[in-house]
Image: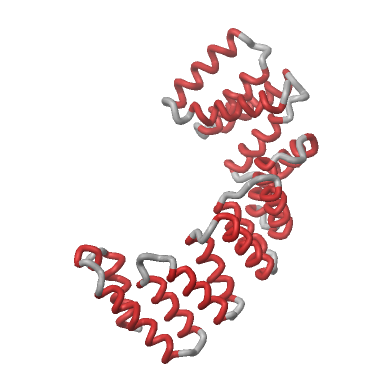
C-alpha cells in the first residue's frame, strides 16, 4: 500500500466530517468494512472518523486492526499520534510520530504533530527544532510560526524566536498576529526602539491607527519616556474622536478611549 493511498484514507475521513453527521459516515464505513473485511485502509479511515467524533477507544481498536492487517501501513502510527495528542497522552504521541517518521522522515504533517506533542510535554527546545523541521518540509502556516516562536522563547532563546517571526513576516507579509508577537518579544528584550519601529511600520499600513498609537504609548511608558507616551496617547484619542459615531460607540472603541484617558 502506498503512502499516498493511506494518507488519502485519512484525508477522506477528515473531509467526511464536513459532509454530514459523523455517525452516518461511521455507519457507511462499517458497511464498506463488511464488504471488504481485509482492507486495512477502511479500518484506518473509520478509525479517523471515530477520532474526529472523539470516540477514542473505537478509534484505537480500528487503528490496531489496520496495523494487524497490514504491518507495512506506516500511516497507522501517524493516526495514533494524532489520537494521543487529542487525549493528552503526549509521551505516546511522541513515540507514535517518531515511529512514523522513521519510515517517512520528510512528512511535514508528522513533524508538526511531533513538535506539538513535545511542546505540550514541556520539551521546549526539541519542540522548537521539530517546528523548524516542519517548516523546512513545507509548512508555512501562521499558527505554526507562532508556535515555533513560543517554543524557542520557552527554551530560553527569544532572539531565535524573533528571527523566526521575521522569517515568517518576510514570507507571509505583515500578518497582525506575527507582528504583535514580534513586538512583544522586542518589549521583553527591552529593545524599545526596535519595538517602536515595528509599531510604526504596522500603523503606517493600517487604515485604523488608534490601537497602534495606544500600543506605542504603552511601550513608551514602559520604557520610562512619559512625555512621549502622553503625546502618543493624545494622538490615539484624536484618532478615536475622528471615527464615525457608529464605530466610536462600539464597546472596543469605548473601552480603548476610557483606558487612554486614564493614562
Residue 135 spot, x, y in % from top left: 67, 50
**Whole-percent x and y of residue 35?**
59, 8
Which residue is rendered at x = 67% and y = 63% of the image?
152
Q: Residue at x 77, y 40 (%)?
A: 105
> From this viewpoint, is residue 174 visible?
yes
Position of 91 with respect to 224 (left or right) is: right
Compared with residue 253, is residue 173 higher up or lower down, i.e. above or below? Answer: above
Left or right side of 242 for 155: right
Give whichever of 139, 254 is nearer the camera.
Answer: 139
Which is more toward the observer, 46 or 131? 131
As drawn, the residue found furthest toward the left would be 245
Q: Quadrant of residue 151?
A: bottom right
Quadrant occupied by the N terminus: top right
Q: Quadrant of residue 227?
A: bottom left
Asked if one can make out residue 153 in the rendered structure from this viewpoint, the answer is no
Whole-percent x and y of residue 6? 67, 25
Front-lying residue, 206 or 101: 206
- Residue 51's place in the image compared with 223, above or below, is above
Judge whether 22 appears above or below 29 on screen.
Answer: below
Question: Residue 177 appears at what percent x and percent y?
Answer: 50, 60
Name the quarter where the C terminus is drawn. bottom left
Amino acid at each position: 500500500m502506498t503512502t499516498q493511498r493511506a494518507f488519502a484514507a485519512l484525508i477522506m475521513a477528515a473531509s467526511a466530517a464536513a459532509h454530514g453527521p459523523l455517525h452516518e459516515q461511521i455507519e457507511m464505513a462499517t458497511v464498506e468494512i463488511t464488504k471488504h473485511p481485509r482492507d486495512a485502509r477502511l479500518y484506518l479511515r473509520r478509525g479517523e472518523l471515530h477520532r474526529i467524533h472523539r470516540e477514542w477507544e473505537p478509534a484505537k481498536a480500528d487503528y490496531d486492526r489496520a496495523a494487524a492487517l497490514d504491518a507495512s501501513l506506516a500511516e497507522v502510527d501517524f493516526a495514533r499520534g494524532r489520537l494521543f495528542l487529542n487525549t493528552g497522552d503526549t509521551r505516546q504521541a511522541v513515540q507514535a510520530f517518531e515511529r512514523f517518521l522513521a519510515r517517512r522522515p520528510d512528512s511535514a504533517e508528522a513533524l508538526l504533530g511531533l513538535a506539538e506533542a513535545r511542546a505540550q510535554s514541556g520539551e521546549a527546545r526539541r519542540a522548537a527544532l521539530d517546528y523548524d523541521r516542519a517548516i523546512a518540509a513545507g509548512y508555512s502556516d501562521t499558527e505554526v510560526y507562532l508556535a515555533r516562536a513560543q517554543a524557542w522563547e520557552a527554551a530560553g532563546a527569544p532572539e531565535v524566536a524573533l528571527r523566526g517571526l521575521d522569517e515568517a513576516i518576510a514570507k507571509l507579509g505583515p500578518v497582525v498576529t506575527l507582528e504583535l508577537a514580534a513586538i512583544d518579544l522586542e518589549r521583553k528584550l527591552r529593545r524599545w526602539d526596535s519595538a517602536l519601529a515595528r509599531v510604526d511600520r504596522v500603523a503606517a499600513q493600517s487604515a485604523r491607527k488608534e490601537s497602534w498609537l495606544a500600543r506605542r504609548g504603552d511601550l513608551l511608558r514602559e520604557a520610562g519616556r512619559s512625555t512621549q507616551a502622553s503625546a502618543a496617547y493624545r494622538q490615539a484619542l484624536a484618532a478615536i474622536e475622528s471615527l464615525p459615531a457608529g464605530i466610536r460607540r462600539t464597546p472596543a472603541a469605548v473601552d480603548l478611549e476610557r483606558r487612554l484617558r486614564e493614562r
